[in-house]
Image: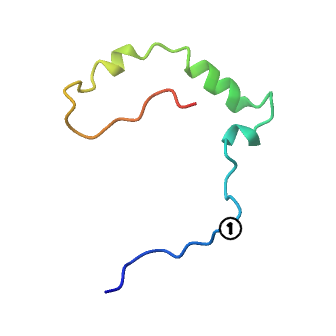
């Protein structure tokens, strides 16, 4: 029986840095956007999510 598996190359370098912020300059506009959006009160939006534990998991709003 054959399996449908992708071959692994352990010598392949990372395609992305361990942290995307490693690519951003200290004063990059994206850092401002991240900092600003973390200050917004999104509790009205969170109130619409199910707290029953059923259904698909939603992504957390703050990813660090």
Q: Residue at x 68, y 32 (%)?
A: 30
The residue closer to the viewer here, 7 or 27, is 7
Q: Which quarter shows the N terminus? A: bottom left
Q: Residue at x 27, y 41 (%)?
A: 56
Residue 32, x across and y down, in percent: 69, 24
Instruction: Tell how many labels.
Output: 1
Task: In the rendered view, tell whether residue 10 sits above or below residue 16.
Answer: below
Q: Residue at x 55, y 19 (%)?
A: 38
The residue closer to the viewer here, 54 or 8, is 8
Image position of 16 (left or right of 51):
right
Question: What is the quadrant of residue 14 in the picture?
Answer: bottom right
Image position of 10 (left or right of 42):
right
Q: Which quarter shows the C terminus? A: top right
Residue 46, x across and y down, in percent: 34, 21
Residue 57, x across and y down, in percent: 31, 37
Q: In the image as oriented, which residue stretches furthest toward the bottom?
A: 1
Residue 4, x across and y down, in percent: 39, 78
Image position of 42 (left or right of 49):
right
Query: Which residue bears the numbered disc 1?
Result: 12
**Quick one: SS at disc 1?**
loop
Question: What is the quadrant of residue 31 in the picture?
Answer: top right
Task: In the rendered view, tell whether residue 12 sits above or below residue 48.
Answer: below
């Amino acid at each position: 029986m054959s399996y449908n598996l992708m071959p692994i190359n352990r010598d392949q370098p990372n395609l992305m840095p361990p942290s995307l912020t490693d690519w951003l300059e200290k004063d990059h506009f994206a850092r401002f956007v991240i900092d600003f959006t973390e200050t917004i009160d999104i509790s009205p939006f969170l109130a619409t999510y199910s707290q029953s534990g059923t259904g698909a998991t939603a992504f957390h709003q703050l990813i660090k």
